Amino acid sequence: MQKDIVVVQGEQNPVTGTVNRKCPCCEVVKPLNDFGLRRMKHAGPNGEDVIRNQSWCRECRSSGRRAMLVAWDAA
């Protein structure tokens, strides 16, 4: 059984110890818990699955998805 590789991107707050990340969409620094995870099949160096955090926060991803669906329905 192959193990998954977990990649976490963010900066640790030295005071609270939490890992934070800046969302490129809203440009707000948020805790890593506000970002979803993505599984990338066979993206590891030896064909392992890689699990990493999403670049956009959950709020931006859901609002962007809603806007995309509205635009799709309007077309």
Image (cartoon, rainbow, N blue to C red):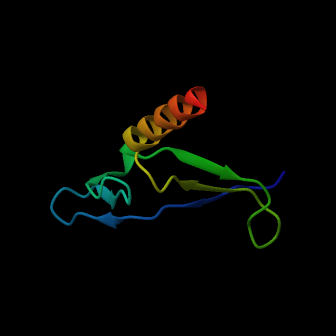
- From the viewer's perspective, tell me whether residue 28 is left or right of residue 1: left
Pick the residue in front: 42 or 56. 56
Q: Residue at x 37, y 38 (%)?
A: 59
Report x, y in % for residue 39.
Answer: 66, 49
Q: Nearer the viewer, residue 29 or 31?
A: 29
- In front here: 29 or 60? 60
Q: Farthest residue in the left direction?
A: 15
The picture quadrant where one finds residue 51 is bottom right
Residue in the image at 48% along x and 31% along y:
66
Quadrant the C terminus occupies: top right
Q: Is residue 68 above or below residue 39?
A: above
Closer-to-camera residue (62/44): 62
Determine which quarter of the picture holds residue 63.
top left
Q: Is residue 44 above or below residue 59?
A: below
Residue 64 position within the rendered picture, expressed as x and y whole percent measured from the top left: 46, 41
- Where does residue 1 sit, x and y in percent of width and height? 84, 51
- Residue pictured at 49% horizontal, 61% vertical: 8
Q: Residue furthest top?
A: 73
Horizontally, residue 68 falls left or right of residue 58, namely: right
Residue 74 percent location from the top left of the image: 55, 28
Image point (42%, 40%), residue name: 58
